[in-house]
Amino acid sequence: MLLWGGGWTALKILTLALPMDIIIFWRFFLMSLTFLPILYFLNKPITLNISSMKFILTSSFLNIAFMISSFLGVKHGYAGAGSVIITTLSPVITFILVVIIFRKRLDNLQYIGLFIGIVGAIIILQLNDLSLFFNGSNTYFLLCALIWAGVTILSQHSHKHIHPIHYSFFISLIATIASFTYAYDSNLASVFDQNLEFWIALLYLAVLGQTLATTIFFIASGKLGSEKTSSYMFLVPIFALLSAWIVLDEPMEIHIIVGGILSTMAVVFINKKRGQFS
């Protein structure tokens, strides 16, 4: 969560330097390279079958879609605001999807949590004024939250078919190939003309904020369940807001903070069952 929080500041720096297709390719390419030593030390045989490939291909598509939406959102909005919207609403959306898809029964406290989450979403996204929502970056951030909810659920159920490290590697590899086919005629070598700040941001995003953090997240989702794993994401906005404030001098908007607190409370209620935390 700490590594993910700083990733939003790194992404903002990158959006100001080069076009989206170039950034997305290099992000997934470096991520794939970083996985190679991890695979070597893991020393587990890789097994692929039709079931695992379904999860890998779907998650690869969703990861590319998430990267596109987050890039556009951060480019036109605040990195700190994006982190709050995505990481506080995604757990609530994940829980709703689990309830719908798997017909999970809710406790009274979980109904309260969903209600609080809806209120928090209204405040965060400024849905009281639709002109602000549709004209700003909030639509991209909300789409990111929806996409990541799907990624979370897929990562949990993929563990039945493939090791989470292998899962993460093949997702990044396929995303690298797919993004290259789109960006191959762009000036991909332009990254070598960038300054030290750019490279620090790119390496942080690809290695620490993606390879390491995402692998930890996928492992956790398989052991704890998608709903509970998502609840830890409320820590990301704290680190993201602080890093964006320190590095980018971004303001801390009151509606983002208030809505984020309410959404965090929603996650607490959602994960509270019969008098104790699930």
Image (tube, rainbow, N blue to C red):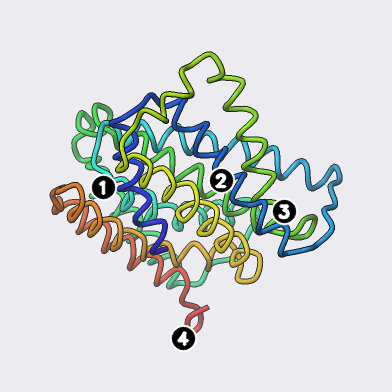
Who comes first in sequence, dot 4 or dot 3? 3
Helix, strand or loop status at disc 4: loop
- Position of 192 relative to 43 (above/below): above
Instruction: For marks 3 and 1, give the CA distance.
Output: 32 Å
Q: Which residue is mark 4?
A: 275
Q: Which residue is mark 1?
A: 81
Mark 4 or mark 1: which is in front?
Answer: 1
84, 16: nearer the viewer? 16
Who comes first in sequence, dot 2 or dot 1? 2
Q: Which residue is mark 3?
A: 166
Mark 2 or mark 1: which is in front?
Answer: 2
Give x and y (percent) for residue 274.
Answer: 50, 83
Q: Residue at x 61, y 62 (%)?
A: 104
The reply to whether the C-beta atoms of the residues labelled 3 and 1 are less than 8 Å apart is no
**Residue 163 left/right relative to 242:** right
Q: Which residue is mark 2?
A: 31
Q: Residues within 10 Å of mark 3 (few under 14, many from 20)?
A: many
Give x and y (percent) for residue 4.
Answer: 41, 56
225, 48: nearer the viewer? 48
Give, as a three-letter code, the residue at label 1. Ala
Give x and y (percent) for residue 142.
Answer: 38, 41
Who comes first in sequence, dot 2 or dot 4? 2
